[in-house]
Amino acid sequence: MEKYICENVFVPLRSGPTHRAEMLSQILFGEKYHILDRAGHWMKIETLFDSYTGWIDNNHLLQTPETDESKGMVLNRSLLCYKKDRTKIILEAGCEIYEPDFEEKSFKVGSDRYTTCNEFNNNYLTHNESLADIAMKFINSPYIWGGRIPSGMDCSGFTQLVYKIYG
């Protein structure tokens, strides 16, 4: 089965192939998935990170076939970055990056290399913090059903994010 990698900050994973369907979860930047089925401009997918299945709108998804078997490194805070075409994106904690180059302030996701103007170093990646310290970073995050990022998460998304960053 072919693997793909998400190149959007997040994409809603829905219970059915319509925007009115419940958001079950989100696929985050750098996470990989399999396509199980297609219906119009919708795809039924299964995420490799947590094995959730649901529907994503093909029109809102940048996707790249993925052959790299390496494990992504998880960001533990937000990071402003640029794609080759100078498109800005703000990645959230929990997003995954590959092949970070701290000297060049860049990383890879899919077939694209991204750069950042931030002081990009190992502190953006998972390091030896306690579960409590990681969890405290997300106090006052808004509640969004099915959310998995600091700008909106539910209880299971919060738990999943904390443990994902913890490693």
Image (cartoon, rainbow, N blue to C red):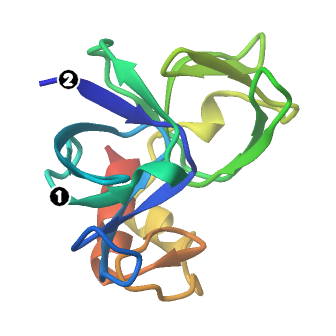
Q: Is residue 19 visible?
A: yes
* Quadrant (top left, top right, bottom left, bottom right) of the C terminus: top left
In the drawing, does residue 31 fall left or right of residue 55?
Answer: right
Q: Nearest the camera: 113 or 157?
A: 113
Measured Cα–Cα span from mark 2 to mark 1: 17 Å
Q: Residue 53: where, in percent of width, then height?
A: 16, 58
* Quadrant (top left, top right, bottom left, bottom right) of the N terminus: top left
Q: Residue 85: where, in percent of width, then height?
A: 82, 25
Q: Nearest the camera: 37 or 54?
A: 37
Residue 102 position by quadrant: top right
In the image, residue 151 sits, relative to residue 105, either above or below, namely below
- Farthest residue, direction front: 40
Count of residue discs? 2
The residue wearing badge 1 is 52
Q: Residue 143: where, in percent of width, then height?
A: 48, 88
In the drawing, does residue 89 fall left or right of residue 117?
Answer: left
Residue located at (23% from left, 44% from top): 49
In the image, residue 42 sits, relative to residue 113, either above or below, namely below
Amino acid type at circle 2 is Glu
Label 1 crowd (10 A; few <14 / some 14-19 / many >=20): some
Camera-near label (2 vs 1) is 2
Amino acid type at circle 1 is Tyr
The residue wearing badge 2 is 2
Q: Nearest the camera: 70 or 163?
A: 70
In the image, residue 128 sits, relative to residue 15, either above or below, namely above
Q: Residue 92: where, in percent of width, then height?
A: 60, 54
- Helix, strand or loop at mark 2: loop
In the drawing, does residue 57 fall left or right of residue 92?
Answer: left
Residue located at (61% from left, 29% from top): 122
